[in-house]
Amino acid sequence: MKRIVLPLLSVLMLGCGDDTLPKPMGYLRLEYPNAVYEKAILPLPFSFEKNKLADPITTVKSLGKTNGVNIKYTPLKATIYLTYKEVKNGNIDSLLRDAQNLTQKHAIKADEISHQLFENKEANVYGMLYEIGGNAASQSQFYVTDSINHFLSGSLYFYAKPNYDSIYPASEYLKKDITRIMETVRWKE
């Protein structure tokens, strides 16, 4: 009996050396095409370059006057909303405060909010880009102005429940488009 039990125990102990581990979860790798930009001609007092991946631009009217632009990215289920306001009667402080308050409304769900100053002295365009980390409704907010006549604000929203890990690749891709919009804004005189 000992002759059978000892070899059997030895085989069992040697055969159980490595525990079987589950495979790690796989994640979908999202890759987007290289951006190709074209000038957006609008019935507004500014122009900019937009990514050709975006759908045709739709303009937004308020009180019978065009004052906004929607840049929809159907493949990414996202839209960049741009709102134009005229600077008049010293309302620049109010416009800046409103843009900053809109960003701060996302602080409840945000893990962090970072900001980056933007300045293009040659084109007379100055602004701020806010990046919102975490499960906030908007991942990017920005504004540009000449501080005298023009004020343009923008927000990026996705058509999905905010899940930062899932929308991060699309958010990073669109952040480049937002930066390009800011860099190429030109005020019409």
Image: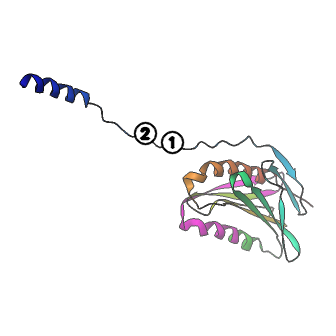
Task: Name the image quarter holding residue 64.
Answer: bottom right
- In the image, 25: left or right of 158? left
Q: Which residue appears at 80% of the width and 54% of the height? A: 55
Helix, strand or loop at disc 2? loop
Q: Residue at x 60, y 69 (%)?
A: 105
Q: Would residue 75 be counted in the magenta stretch?
A: no
Mark 1 surroundings: few (<14), some (14-19) or many (≥20) residues within 10 A? few
User: Which residue is at the front of the view, 41 or 143?
Assistant: 41
Can you say which quadrant of the picture contains the C terminus?
A: bottom right
Q: Nearer the viewer, residue 19 or 116?
A: 19
| 147 left or right of 106 in image | right
Please state the horizontal and vertical placement of residue 61, each as a whole percent of the image: 85, 71
Q: Residues within 10 Å of mark 2 (few under 14, many from 20)?
A: few
**Residue type beneath disc 1:** Gly
Look at 47% across and 43% down and name the residue there.
25
Q: Are marks 1 and 2 in contact (CB under 8 Å)?
A: yes
Q: Position of residue 65 (x, y in %)?
A: 88, 73
Calculate the distance from the C-alpha at mark 1 to the C-alpha at mark 2: 9 Å
Q: Position of residue 148 (x, y in %)?
A: 83, 66
Q: Which residues are magenta?
A: 98-125
Residue at horizontal 59 percent and vertical 42 percent from the top: 29
Q: Is residue 30 above or below residue 127?
A: above
Q: Amino acid at mark 2?
A: Lys
**What numbered label is drawn on residue 26?**
1
The verdict on residue 116 being magenta is: yes
Would you name the residue on which mark 2 appears? 23
Quadrant position of the N terminus in the picture: top left
SS class of the residue under badge 1? loop
